[in-house]
Image: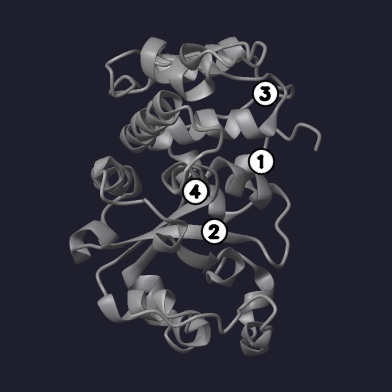
Amino acid sequence: MEWDPHFLARSPMFETLRAHATAFGAGWPERADLQRLLDRHTPPVRTSAGMSLRLAPQGRRSRVLEDRYEARIYLRGEMACRERNWHDLLNVLVWLAFPRAKAALNARHYAALSAQHAAGAANRGPTQDTLTLFDEGGVIVASSDGELLACLREWRWKDLFWANRARLAAQVRFRLFGHALYEKALRPFIGVTGRGILLKTEPELIAAPLVEQMAALDAKIAEHVSDAGRLVATRELAVVPILGVPGWCSDNEREAYYDNTDYFRPGRREP
């Protein structure tokens, strides 16, 4: 996809990033431009090891533990970032929006990678798969209404998105987290699905101004991710049909839209 300086205005799905990114110019931002965004962020964007996040060329693949992608971030604060690349650009913007949560994810990734290396295992384990799934395709679903969260958890899509539409708008906030999910949002298609962490929150947080709300959600997700007993299996992450969220797709203004069971699948029922 060619460069679009107005991509943040394309959809309400990008609201989270708009709060932390300035307007872009007519051409692709260079790595140095993105570094300046990180450097201007308050508070500073740091890894869990206390390193300031610095963008670096990708380099060659390496089997040396210390030179792997997540290890470079954790140990040296050095994040590989390709220029003219939507995936990496959006990843930088997510670090701006959720610095504590991204740092916590990186720390868990590094711990899991170190354990894999120490054991001499060739393949990643289920924890690494789960962390990657949220990092790439995650969505935060925060609500003061436990019943609406239960509708999502139990795949009751029409109850959630249509029958309780007004209630949903007042009491639930969907915030995209995964940079691969943002990349899909550039050209959304029926079928795009996120994997969510569901947070039961106080009503005051749902009603808070965006920047204040984001800081609170960042802290909550960082705490959730840092718990070694969580995110150990992909089934912990709730399925979220992104284009079912009211306002995120013009077609979902019709009730019949939610009858598409290829997208809004009845799925499994979990306790």
Circle 3: element type: loop
Residue 119: image x %, image y %? 41, 29
Q: How far apart are labels 1 and 3 at the CA level?
A: 11 Å
Amino acid type of the residue that numbered disc 1 sits on in the rendered structure: Phe
Q: According to the image, label 1 marks what residue?
A: 7
Amino acid type of the residue that numbered disc 4 sits on in the rendered structure: Glu
User: If you read the primary sequence from the N terminus, does the residue marked by circle 4 or circle 2 appear first?
Assistant: 4
Circle 2: element type: strand
Q: According to the image, label 2 marks what residue?
A: 194
Q: Residues within 10 Å of mark 1 (few under 14, many from 20)?
A: some
Quadrant (top left, top right, bottom left, bottom right) of the C terminus: bottom left
- Give the side of residue 160 with respect to residue 214, left or right: right
Q: Which of the numbered marks, if any, corresponds to residue 15?
A: 4
Q: Nearer the viewer, residue 150 or 216?
A: 150
Q: According to the image, label 3 marks what residue?
A: 25
Q: Is there CB contact under 8 Å for labels 3 and 2?
A: no
User: If you read the primary sequence from the N terminus, does the residue marked by circle 1 or circle 4 appear first?
Assistant: 1
Q: How far apart are labels 2 and 1 at the CA level?
A: 20 Å
Q: Residues within 10 Å of mark 2 (few under 14, many from 20)?
A: many
Select label 3 or label 4 by which is in front.
Answer: 4
Q: Which of the numbered marks, if any, corresponds to residue 44?
A: none
Amino acid type of the residue that numbered disc 2 sits on in the rendered structure: Gly
Residue 118: image x %, image y %? 40, 24
Where residue 47 sits, quadrant-wise, is top left
